[in-house]
Amino acid sequence: MTTTNKNILFFIIFFLLNLQNKTFAVETKKIIEKENLIKNIDKIKIIAEETPIRSFFEEPGNDKKNDKKENKDQKSPENATPTISTTQKIVGSEIDIVSRIFNKLKIPFEIEIVHWTEMLPKMISGEADMAIGIEKNSKFDKYVNFTRTPTYTKNYSFYGLSSQLKDTFVMSFEDAVAHNYSVGILIGFSYPKVFWEAYPFENKQLNSHLFEGKNIRDNIIKLKERKIDLLIADRERTNIILKKIGADETIFQYKNILYWKEFFLVFSKKLKKEKYEMLKAKIDRELYKMTESEEINEINESWIKKGT
């Protein structure tokens, strides 16, 4: 190899090494800037609706945490604005999940319980940075960004009396309608499109197959007393309630899932782009790890057992 070729080769190697070092320095600078952005983030304001199991006020020494409502989708009276005293604290499965993530990331945060009618306005205005327990494809879609991984999922099935079982372990909407079965539902509960397609309103009145109960327990009692043929409810809570009241042998859960609902953490679109991108990346990663390790499932199950 000639001296000229050696010099050219040396120059190329030097150029590539220098370029690599510059690229590494730029990438390192970006990482440091992102980390500093997280460190310098002001306290993140998180809001939640007062909901049994998920996010609610607990008085010290009070073990009965969920007397107010039986399920998340029932709406509070318009004048029932949540209040908090100096002796109350906010607890629940969603609170545990969020607290673990933010404490691990060392990001300051505060959680406020607000009336459900305040949730959307606060996200639209940017008064709150994040919200807990929001269902996708809801009215929030236009104003928030969702995490990739849900914090919990509810699966819904039919329940019937074991004594009425024959050879079938599956009960679809079509099957229930064909058999003219009466179905217990919950007052004020939010049901999906597939449900209302099976049970459309009749002359602007509730479908004649449907009978409203005030909570899951109420519908279980109606089923045991044969006032209804079936009830529809989420598996996670209903199965635990059945065991708790000793009705798990007399009431049967059909195997098929009729529909499900997923609930997420969301970010206000008013949150600054740089903060949002960094927060979302980190929170998504932590949610994924907690889901893979079954930590989220364990948290949810422990609070379901406490609260039913």
Image (cartoon, rainbow, N blue to C red):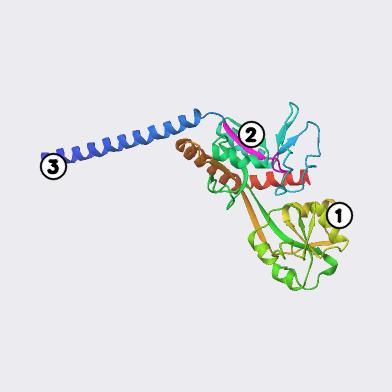
Check disc 2 and report the residue beneath it.
Answer: 111
Q: What residue type is labelled 1?
A: Gly
Q: For the view shown, which residue lies furthest in the front direction?
A: 203
Check disc 3 and report the residue beneath it.
Answer: 5
Q: In this view, does 67 lie above or below 168?
A: above
- Position of the N terminus, as image quadrant, is top left
Query: Which mark's residue is nearer the viewer, 2 or 3?
Result: 2
Disc on the earlier residue, 2 or 3: 3
Q: Is residue 26 above or below residue 258?
A: above
Q: Is residue 292 above or below residue 102?
A: below
Q: In this view, does 11 lie to the left or right of 204?
A: left
Q: Which amino acid does label 3 sit on?
A: Asn
Quadrant of the rendered image containing residue 179: bottom right
Check disc 1 and report the residue beneath it.
Answer: 246
Q: Is residue 20 left or right of residue 202?
A: left
Quadrant of the rendered image containing residue 104: top right
Could you say whether the residue bearing mark 3 is in a helix, strand or loop? helix
On residue 172, the disc is none
Q: Residue at x 66, y 60 (%)?
A: 259
Q: For mark 1, does the 10 Å Cα neighbourhood hold few (<14), some (14 to 19), or many (20 or more) residues?
A: few
Tag 2 near tag 3, CB within 8 Å: no
Q: Which of 111 and 103 is in front in this view?
A: 111
- Tell me where the magenta segment starts and ends, as one range: 44-55
Percent of width and height locating residue 59: 78, 32
Disc on the earlier residue, 1 or 3: 3
Disc on the earlier residue, 2 or 1: 2
